[in-house]
Amino acid sequence: MQKTAIVCVTNDLSTDQRVHKTCLTLEKCGYWVIEYGRLLPESLPLERPYFTLRKKLLFKKGPQFYAEFNIRLFFYLMTKQLDLIFANDLDTLPAAYLAAKLRNKKLIYDTHEYFTETPELVNRKLTQFIWKKIEDYLFPKLSDILTVNASIAKLYGDKYNKTVRVSRNIPLTFAPKRLKTRKELDLPESKHILILQGTGINIERGAEETVLAMQYLENVVLLVVGSGDVFPVLQKMVCKQNLQDKVIFKQKMPFAELRQYTMNSDLGLAIDKDTNLNYHFSLPNKLFDYIHSGIPTLSSGLVELKQIIDKYDIGYYIQNHDPKHIAEVIKRIFEDEIRYKQVKENTAKAKKELCWENEEKVLMEIIKKSDL
């Protein structure tokens, strides 16, 4: 009988490429895969080669949401035929761990960030305290642990004296059958396009300063694609500064559609601020999306970002988040056409090496180990 893996995540599945790739890798390893998440009013439709299940919940956020999600997930895991539970991030771990323990099933834990130091928690001390207590209780009991970069792996490894493997969130090799033109995408054809993309475009990640920098740039537009808590702030800033002709907003969209916009851009932005431990050691997914789209990256030089950008010579840096400084750096990038062409060409080598087909080998080792 074919083995079954249930992959647990608290989002709506539609734009989470890491979890999607995890499911595909599990299929390669011989599993029948069920991806379990939640359904929101704005959730995009899904087309997946494996089974997906999205539950409507009474609560959308806060402790009530996490409690409801874990209770419902626990009962689902207790009643389904399964061989492996794959928990993504700390907010799915309580239900996943308890069900795996009671049923004597294998559990793999994938932490996508340094969860307890995210900005959503660092300013809410009681909530952070509760999540830390949950992590302190459960993490030492885990056997198979995975995370997104070496810095976060070391933090967890040192704290809990555990082996934490690294599998970065690198895209599958993908090219659209046909690249649409800027005109088809309703983008300006004769201007340089900056792109800032992601489902976590949040406050204190450099988006606000980027919008303000547009005041000092000519023949350049900023394309912001995705979602996050800073979107309403950015839209108000654009209106206040009369930048409607320089900033374009697009809501989150399916991956293949997003890639069309990224490939039609000239420079990808990854200028996250070093304001907390989670950001300090983060490796934003958008960096790899820019690489696979063949465009250079403008970065703030965070530890993990800098290692990759310097290794392949695929980008540029800002020294601070002053809007005038950001604008000056962008001007210099486009003025030096020879240097820009070389940096852009360098993304081809990076793309060849930094692909999920190479990166998933670590995950496959962990899956096979759990089968023993």
Image (cartoon, grey):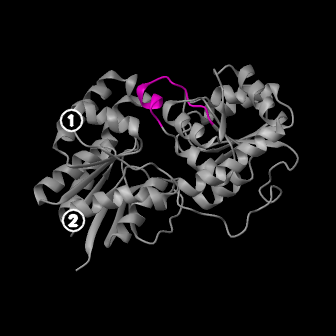
- Quadrant in the picture for residue 306: top right
Return the x and y of residue 16 as percentages of the image width and height: 47, 53
Which residue is identified by label 1? 161
Query: What whole-number distance in Å separates the C-alpha atoms at marks 1 and 2?
Result: 23 Å
Give the SS element for disc 2: helix
For the N terminus, give its image quadrant. bottom left
Identified at 60% across, 43% down, the residue is 312
Q: Main secondary structure of the magenta part?
A: loop
Give the SS element for disc 1: loop
Residue extent of the magenta highlight: 270-282
In-image side of 93 versus 244 (left or right): left
- Quadrant in the picture for residue 26: bottom left
> Is 293 rendered above or below residue 46?
above
Return the x and y of residue 210 as percentages of the image width and height: 69, 29
Q: How many marks?
A: 2
Tell whether label 2 touches label 1 (CB within 8 Å). Answer: no
Looking at numbered disc 1 in the image, what kind of residue is underneath it? Asn
Return the x and y of residue 73 as percentages of the image width and height: 27, 55
For the C terminus, give its image quadrant. bottom left
Identified at 75% across, 20% down, the residue is 324
Looking at numbered disc 2 in the image, what kind of residue is underneath it? Asp
> Mark 1 vs mark 2: which is more N-terminal?
1
- Decide: few, some or many residues near mark 2? Use Cα within 10 Å; few <14, some 14-19, many ≥20: few
- Decide: few, some or many residues near mark 1? Use Cα within 10 Å; few <14, some 14-19, many ≥20: few
Magenta segment: does it hold 273? yes
Tag of residue 371: 2
Magenta segment: does it hold 223? no
Identified at 44% across, 32% down, the residue is 281
> Is 289 rendered above or below residue 371?
above
Identified at 68% across, 19% down, the residue is 322
> Is 2 rendered above or below residue 348?
below
